[in-house]
Image (spheres, rainbow, N blue to C red):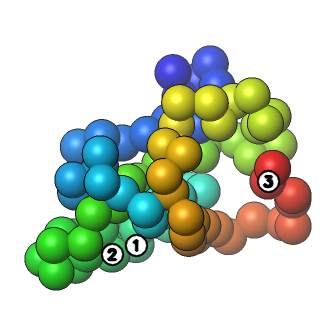
């Protein structure tokens, strides 16, 4: 899924994903490490959240997000170190 779509949910990294209104999204390996640390802290505080990883932001299209983040997500934090690029 990651190679085909350029984005993938990391279900093992989230906490109570069915109730998640917060999503953490990483772009890059180092940034994924930071997001995983944040996810662990959120889990310790019992905050429901989802984690996703973007392999290549330039390949993303709106349709690629289908099924990655649930509609209930109200806030998304994207951790990145790239050139500016609009993510729809």
For disc 1, the neighbor class at 10 Å (few under 14, some 14 to 19, many from 20) is: few
Depth check: give the residue in front, 86 or 49.
Answer: 49
Q: Residue at x 87, y 58 (%)?
A: 86
Asked whether residue 52 is in view, the answer is yes
> Does 47 appear above or below 70?
below
Q: Position of residue 49 (x, y in %)?
A: 34, 61
Q: Is residue 28 above or below residue 41?
A: above
Identified at 75% across, 65% down, the residue is 82
The reply, left or right, for residue 41 in relation to residue 3 is left
Q: Residue tagged by mark 2?
A: 38
Q: Position of residue 48 (x, y in %)?
A: 27, 63
Give residue 15's quadrant in the image. Answer: bottom left
Q: Which mark is residue 48?
A: none
Q: CA distance from mark 1 to mark 3?
A: 20 Å
Report how far apart the C-alphas of labels 3 and 2 lie in the structure: 22 Å
Give the SS element for disc 2.
helix
């Amino acid at each position: 899924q990651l190679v085909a779509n350029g984005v993938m949910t990391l279900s093992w990294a989230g906490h109570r994903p069915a109730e998640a209104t917060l999503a953490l999204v990483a772009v890059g390996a180092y940034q994924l490490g930071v997001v995983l640390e944040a996810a662990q802290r959120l889990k310790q505080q019992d905050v429901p959240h989802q984690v996703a990883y973007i392999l290549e932001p330039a390949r993303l299209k709106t349709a690629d997000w289908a099924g990655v983040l649930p509609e209930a997500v109200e806030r998304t934090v994207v951790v990145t170190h790239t050139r500016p690029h609009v993510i729809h």
